Image: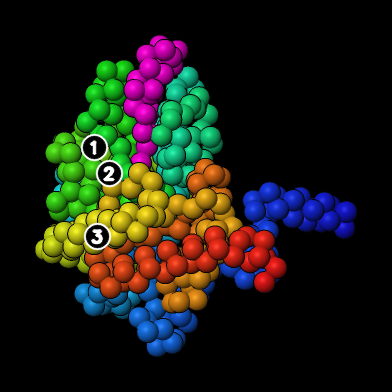
Amino acid sequence: MQEQRSSFLDYAERRYRLAGSALVAGGNHPYFVQTDLLENEADQWSGGFLSLSHYDYLGMMHDPQVTSAAKAAIDQFGTGAGGSRLVGGERSIHRAFEAELAEFLGVGGVLSIISGYLTNMSIIGHVMTGRDLVVADELAHNSIISGCKAAKCAFLTYPHNDLEALDALLSECREDYGRVLIATDGLFSMDGDITDLPRLLDIKEAHNAWLLLDEAHSYGVLGETGRGLSEHFGIDPQRIEIAVGTLSKSFGASGGFIAADAKVIEWLKFTLPGFVYSVGLAPSTVASARAALGLLKSEPQRVARLRKNSRMFLEMAQEAGLDTGDAIGEAVVPVLFDGPEECVFVAGVLLEQGIYAPPVVHVGIPKDAPRVRCFISAKHDQKDFERTVHAIVAARAAFRTIGQEGLRAG
């Protein structure tokens, strides 16, 4: 027994080293920060506490209408759903919210699920089996990649946003498979760029394939009224077989959802493992997301403010000589660095100044592209961006002046 425990601990430690544990050795790192404590101590910084790490794009998390709706739902329905909606029943608020969200998105139906990550993990393997093929953008979200790997079908990737390569790949191998699903993000959460949806749909239809489009970061962000990538390009959303969204970004809550034809949603309600075998969303979560949806519909100016802020920050960063990669200025703006040590150092300096923007050095990105990823909100303002850009530029200069070895010695 002791030998088995020791071998597992050795294995875990080895995997942790390979994942880059040296960068977080000693606990002096800008991860797992208790941000509520920083907010309570905000007066120690002249500009207060500033978060660029939370994807509350439209400022819904602390909106009084949203929080009041959640509190009222707890009083009415209790704290949890109490079981799977299929066998334990659902609350009226579940169905009402899904109907309103489907109407807003212009699709036949919506099915909400306890976890956004679980949504992709569950739907891909459920839809694709046997002789089928899934082809995903190589930089698609980990939930898509992991869902593809877990499925029993074949799995291939195409170079990031290289749709001509996708077209060539399908021209070469489409006949070898029964059904083909293309899976990609709408707005990429690490790079802040988007998929060319019109071209992607042309390719999909030319090769008799289906499309799964993850709009987790694009609902509430893209399009004049926040209806996502299809609105951004002026395309009928019903041309997309499966759209996946989340409630944890623009809606300020948690959980995921699938948007599709009403008949598809009805099928999934009785068969999708991630829904059938998981507890339903807590009524308070549904109530807060529903209130946020109502605000999004009645106050589309939130989307406009977010877009203005995003492009302001992008332009400031670029003018200061920072590398923002392929970001287009829509909610997600990464600042790339030459190496992980520099990236972690800069993020640490930011935190010391009350700016929370953790580094991304190994998980979900190429290892040679470490970055501080900045999530922009409609609630940010120009002073926030000036403060952040100045701090990043100064910290980067300090790192390059002192040198990596000097910083370690200090």
Is 180 magenta? The answer is yes
Residue nearest the observer in this picture, 193 or 258: 193
Tags 2 and 1 in contact by the CB under 8 Å rule? no
| Amino acid tagged 1 | Asp
Residue 12 x, y percent position in the rendering: 73, 53
Location of the C terminus by quadrant is: bottom right
Residue for badge 3: 312
Q: How many labels does the image show?
A: 3
Q: Determine which quarter of the picture holds residue 401.
A: bottom right
Q: Which mark is residue 259?
A: 2
Asked if residue 356 is among those painted magenta in the image, a careful observer would answer: no
Residue shown at the point (45%, 77%) measured from the top left? 353
Q: Is label 2 in a helix, a strand or a loop?
A: strand
Please report the bounds of the magenta region as a residue range.
Answer: 161-187
> Horizontal and vertical percent for residue 333?
35, 54
Q: Is mark 1 on a helix, strand or loop?
A: loop
Residue 19 appears left or right of 140: right
- Residue farthest toward the front in the current orientation of the protein: 401
| Residue in the foreground of this view, choosing between 123 and 52 | 52
Of the residues tagged 3 and 1, which is closer to the observer?
Answer: 3
Q: Quadrant of the N terminus?
A: bottom right
